[in-house]
Image (cartoon, helix red, strand yellow):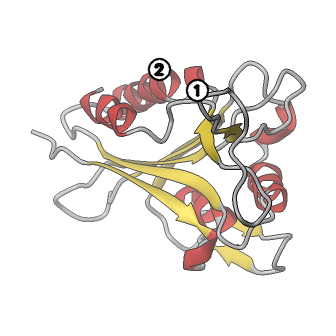
Amino acid sequence: MANYRCEVSIVQRSQGQSAVASAAYASRSKIKDERTGKMYDYRGRCDKIYDEIILPTNAPAKYRNRAELWNSVELYEKSKDAQLARTVGLDLPIELDREQQIELVQEYVQKNFVERGMIADVSIHDSMDRQPRNPHAHIVLTMRELDADGKFKNRGKKVYILDKNRERIKLKNGKFKSRKETINDWDKTETLLLWRES
């Protein structure tokens, strides 16, 4: 029986992490980070048995190119503490053959991520040369939805807090009291629990 594992984490620039590096590692490929000039090369690892990028319907075809996709994400995010990508690690049942493992991951990714508007960069690894085998999937996901033109949208919007007269509340610094509302449920605990259950 397969071990259960569904690890979800955020790739954060403030932690010195890179979406390009995460994608290169997961896909065992070589990609240059255009923002920093650093080259990430994981081609020497020989455990990748499958990879693909799965796009929502409104995503430009150019994002099927891994370097184009993750460099676009890196260049779009300007903040030094930007959240660049979400990663998901899943163990796969060894009882399934390779084709079944791939189909299982594709269905899971389509239902839980792509149908919500994320671009999913999917890779499956397995330690073929040693026992016990360890089939598992690495999924790197975009953090922003795409608009109808295929451009990244804001993750949230500013909402002003109003007083009882429905007027904005002014702060001492001259700004108005506000909060940020997210435009989707991707960061909610309930959503993470659904992904784990699925």
Q: Residue at x 80, y 60 (%)?
A: 174
Q: Residue at x 81, y 79 (%)?
A: 36
Residue designated by label 1? 114
- Crowd tier of the residue under label 1, counting other residues whose Cα lies within 10 Å: few below 14, some 14–19, many 20 or above: many
Q: Is residue 9 left or right of residue 68?
A: left
- Which residue is outermost to the right? 149
Amino acid on which the number 2 mark rests in the picture: Lys
Q: CA distance from mark 2 to mark 1?
A: 7 Å
Q: Splitting the image into 4 quarters, where does residue 57 fall?
A: top right
Q: Is residue 87 visible?
A: yes
Q: Is residue 59 left or right of residue 9?
A: right
Amino acid on which the number 1 mark rests in the picture: Val
Residue designated by label 2? 111
Above or below, comparing residue 133 to residue 51 in the picture:
below
Residue 155 is situated, as x and y percent measured from the top left of the image, at 68, 41
Viewer-proximal residue, 37 or 51?
A: 37
Q: Is residue 125 left or right of residue 44?
A: left
Q: Splitting the image into 4 quarters, where does residue 141 fall?
A: top right
Q: Is residue 25 visible?
A: no
Checking the image for residue 106, the label placed there is none
